[in-house]
Each structure stands twice: as structure tokens, then as C-alpha cells.
Amino acid sequence: MTKIPLVALISGRGSNLKAIIDANDPLIEIRAVISNRPDAKGLIYAQENGIPTEVLDHKQFATRKSFDTHLQTSIDHYQPKLIVLAGFMRILSSEFVAHYQGRLINIHPSLLPAFKGLNTHQQALEAGVKEHGASVHFVTEDLDAGPVIIQASVPVLPDDDSESLGARVLIEEHRIYPQAIHWFAEKHLF
Ligand code: GRF
């Protein structure tokens, strides 16, 4: 059985990456984890699991375009069929997104199309919604707007602050991201 090779991009904690690693999906092979921040904690867990890691510090590049070009070269070196953004906190250029069209996915902590951008849990609390959640979606040129693959919802409770609500959402993120990747590997998504 040929496994689907993937590369994951992270910027920080890496709890979604950990969920993907721990899912131990026989249909996928995590070829590399690339971070734009040298101190991203997720790099350590990847290394502990024998996954090659790379750091491409965006601060070392004068323009977004030159960072993206180098990132693309680094990724393509591993010949992935799927690129997984797991808390990767950089906006990607349209050329980059076009290059990976149909094989670049992201997890966003809201029920898209609601609450795009940052601070989604605070946005949800301020909007007074009763239901919040997370979405895995294909990445397109428009931020947080590509086709949704899977969503999970959680209730917003009366005493919630953004931390308690975010923690409830994160549990669902860790469930739906490995599921979306599994569907991609089963070729259910293309
Ligand atoms: C998650 O909430 C994810 O939805 C968002 O960034 C956060 C990353 O967390 N895109 P982690 O690094 O996976 O722990």
C-alpha cells in the first residue's frame, strides 16, 4: 500500500501536529515538519518521533515572496501529495497557494464562514453565538474561505471566556484534522 506523503507546516505549540502524529494513520507518511519559527514547540515532538524537521525563519527574508519561494523549494524537496497547515501563522502568497491547489489544507478555529482571521473565540463570545467550533478546509487565495472538508461544533457556555471556549474547540480540532487527512488519503476528497 502506498502511503500519501505529507509535509506539515507549523509556527508554535503544535498540538494539532501531535494529534496527527498520534493518529498513526497507516495511509499517510509525514515526510517533514517545517516551521517558520525556530522556537516552535511542535518541532520537538516531531523530532522525538523521528520526523525530519526544518526551520525557515521568515525574519531572514526581505519579502513575503522570497520567503514563500524558499518555503516552496523546501516543501517540494519532500515531494508531498498533501501539505498540512497546523497552526502556521503566515499568510501565503497567491503564487504559493496556486502551486499547491487542491492539496493544501488548514484548520481554522471557527465554524467557517463565521469568524475568519484571528481571535476567533473572542469574536464568537462577542457575537453572542450559542455554537462555535472548528473547520478543516482547502486553502484558496482568500483567507479562511476555501471549501470546507469537515467541521465540529461545541456549545458556548454562559461562563465561557476565550480560554475555556478555545480549549473545548481544540479537543474537536484534534479529532477532525486527522479525520480530514484520512479522507484525503482515501482519495475521498478529489
Ligand atoms: C489552532 O487553534 C488552529 O486551529 C489554529 O492555530 C492553532 C494552532 O494550535 N490555526 P497548535 O499549534 O496546533 O497547538
Image: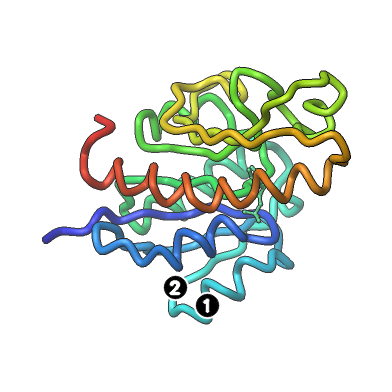
Q: Secondary structure at mark 2?
A: loop
| Residue lying at the far left of the rendered structure | 1
Q: Nearer the viewer, residue 113 or 158?
A: 158
91 shown above or below 84: above
Could you say where residue 49 lies in the image, as x and y percent from the top left? 46, 78
Left or right of 4, for residue 63? right
Q: Amino acid at mark 1?
A: Gln
Quarter of image, res 77: bottom left
Distance (Cα) linking label 2 and label 1 = 5 Å
Residues tagged 2 and 1 counted as in contact (Cβ below 8 A): yes
Q: Which mark is residue 180?
A: none
Q: Amino acid at mark 2?
A: Ile
Residue bearing the label numbered 2? 51
Q: Residues within 10 Å of mark 2 (few under 14, many from 20)?
A: some
**Residue name at image x 52 percent, y 38 percent:** 106
Q: Nearer the viewer, residue 35 or 41?
A: 41
- SS at badge 1: helix
Quadrant in which the N terminus appears: bottom left
Q: In the rendered image, which residue does mark 1 sit on?
A: 47
- Residue 46's x, y, as percent? 52, 72
Residue 86: % across, % down: 56, 49
Q: In this image, 96 relative to 119: left or right?
A: left
Furthest-front residue in this view? 158
Q: Position of residue 79 (x, y in %)?
A: 31, 53
**Which residue corresponds to the image point at 47% horizontal and 45% vertical from the top-left?**
176
Above or below, comparing residue 17 to residue 83 in the picture = below
Task: In this rendered view, identify the residue nearer to me: 57 or 126.
Answer: 126
Residue drawn at the location 54% of the way across and 64% of the way down: 18
Q: Is label 2 within 8 A of ligand 1 (CB to nearest ligand atom)? A: no
Q: Nearer the viewer, residue 88 or 122?
A: 122
